Image (cartoon, rainbow, N blue to C red):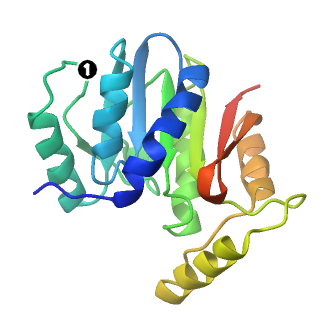
Amino acid sequence: MKQHAPATLRNREPIAAVLARELPASGTVLEVAAGTGEHALFFAQTFPALAWQPTDPSPEALASIAAYRKDYAGHNLAAPLRLDASAPDSWPVAAAEAMVCINMVHISPWEATLGLFAGAERVLAESRGPLILYGPFIEAEVETAPSNRDFDASLKARNPLWGLREAEALDALASRHGMARSARHAMPANNIMLVYRAV
């Protein structure tokens, strides 16, 4: 039942280092598109003062997250919930102190990203916490690495609705939901982390 994503072992510590700078000291972190659940388990262990709420739209992913959670001795990793980012009006979480979304924006239709920011506006309204994204993005002022161009082509070959998104498009989307980019963190393997907060 447990699924395994090899990239998780490579990127979880660099991601955690950034999260340590951006996450609040306490409260609930809503992870959208938690996938296998390996990140959720690692971050729950790394940040014991935070309540980690993993979500995903896939039944297989939810089963994998639950399997990892079963072996976790801590008490701050919540049971996974089904959440479809593209349907923000039906999210099962009403409020959180932060949101994290890893490797979803490029492996989903643009509607999922539209829903992600719409949901973040509502879920983070009271806390004014961060929306933190991780993945490969296209930036106007940064030359796109050949590996990312190849990855973009392979994604679009699998599904024409997928593909690397422009960071500037995300900035514009954030603005429509009362947020602005507060940080950009360069990450290994030509990935970046973008942080958005209410303005």
User: Relative to 86, is 166 on the left or the right?
Assistant: right
User: Relative to 42, is 164 on the left or the right?
Assistant: right
Relative to 8, does residue 95 appear above or below in the rendering? above
Name the foreground residue: 187 vs 140. Answer: 187
Relative to 36, does residue 81 appear above or below in the rendering? above
- The image shows residue 83 at horizontal and vertical percentages of 34, 48
Q: Quadrant of residue 165?
A: bottom right
The answer to whether residue 123 of the structure is visible from this angle is no
Element class at badge 1: loop
What is the residue that sits farthest to the bottom in this orientation?
157
Q: Quadrant of the N terminus?
A: bottom left
User: Relative to 160, is 40 on the left or the right?
Assistant: left
Q: Quadrant of the C terminus?
A: top right
What is the residue that sits farthest to the right in this orientation?
141
Q: Which residue is mark 1?
A: 76
Dot 1, crowdedness within 10 Å: few (<14), some or many (≥20)?
A: many
User: Relative to 145, is 94 on the left or the right?
Assistant: left
Q: Amino acid at mark 1?
A: Asn
- The image shows residue 161 at horizontal and vertical percentages of 55, 78
Relative to 180, does residue 60 appear above or below in the rendering? below
Number of numbered callouts drawn: 1
Q: State the residue at coordinates (74%, 33%).
A: 183
- The image shows residue 56 at horizontal and vertical percentages of 32, 51
Q: State the residue at coordinates (60%, 28%).
A: 130
Q: Quadrant of residue 144?
A: bottom right
Q: State the residue at coordinates (41%, 57%).
A: 7
The answer to whether residue 106 of the structure is visible from this angle is yes
Q: State the residue at coordinates (37%, 42%).
A: 91
- The image shows residue 194 at horizontal and vertical percentages of 67, 42
Name the foreground residue: 111 vs 9. Answer: 9
